[in-house]
């Protein structure tokens, strides 16, 4: 009887933790500018005159960030699934204002957003 109660409590705890994990990955839309994270953070380069450099950096594997409009909050963009590249709509819109919709994650003080759509 005691083992069944402990197993039941374990199952309830596991379901609760799964719910928290899913809440952390809530669907979210963020409007902001697409930036290559190296030049934006290290050199301070951004804007329309930096678009070609940002595209080259992104094509070479520098992570792409989305700086939320009206804030300095940056989301590191991730593909919708493992072992995929970022959608082409991200690369063709480097240094432009877009709205990205995807799943939001936060870990170690870093904000991430999967790219399900770009408008």
Image (spheres, helix red, strand yellow):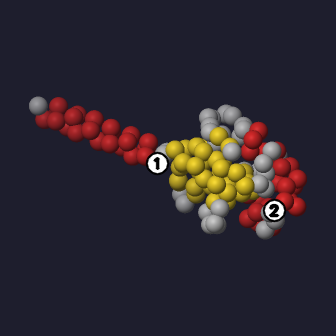
Question: In the current view of this chain or complex, which residue is farthest to the left?
Answer: 1
Q: Position of residue 57 (x, y in %)?
A: 82, 51
- Image coordinates of residue 74 in percent, x first then y, are 64, 59
Q: In the picture shown, does residue 51 fall above or below 19?
A: below
Residue 62 visible in rendering: yes
Query: Which badge, 1 or 2, is on the more N-terminal residue?
Result: 1
Is 24 left, or right, of 95 in this rendering? left
Mark 1 → mark 2, Cα distance in angstroms: 31 Å
For the question of whether residue 65 can be seen, the reply is: no
Locate residue 94, reporting x and y percent: 79, 51
Rendered residue at 75%/41% (across/down): 89
61 or 98, nearer to the observer:
98
Q: How crowded is mark 1: few (under 14 residues within 10 Å), some or many (20 or more)?
A: some
Q: Which residue is drawn at 52% across and 44% down?
A: 27
Location of the N terminus (image quadrant): top left
Give percent across and percent down for residue 86: 71, 40
The numbered mark at residue 50 is: none
Give SS at disc 2.
loop
For the residues bearing labels 1 and 2, Cβ distance under 8 angstroms: no
Q: Name the residue under label 2.
A: 47
Q: Residues within 10 Å of mark 2 (few under 14, many from 20)?
A: some
Q: In this view, does 107 lie to the left or right of 4?
A: right
Q: Residue at x 26, y 38 (%)?
A: 12
* Quadrant for the C terminus in the image: top right
Residue 18 occupies quadrant: top left
Q: In which quarter of the image is residue 17?
A: top left
Q: Look at mark 1 in the image and give the residue it sits on.
A: 24
Asked which quadrant contains residue 71, the reply is bottom right
Observer-nearest of 58 and 9: 58
Residue sitting at x 22%, y 39%? 9
């Amino acid at each position: 009887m005691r083992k069944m109660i402990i197993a039941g409590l374990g199952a309830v705890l596991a379901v609760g933790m799964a719910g928290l994990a899913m809440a952390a990955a809530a669907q979210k839309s963020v409007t902001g500018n697409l930036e290559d994270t190296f030049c934006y953070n290290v050199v301070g380069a951004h804007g329309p005159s930096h678009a070609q450099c940002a595209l080259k950096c992104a094509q070479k594997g520098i992570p792409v960030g989305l700086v939320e409009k009206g804030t300095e909050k940056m989301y590191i963009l991730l593909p919708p699934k493992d072992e995929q590249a970022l959608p082409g709509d991200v690369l063709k819109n480097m240094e432009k204002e877009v709205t990205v919709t995807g799943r939001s994650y936060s870990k170690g003080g870093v904000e991430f957003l999967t790219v399900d759509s770009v408008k």
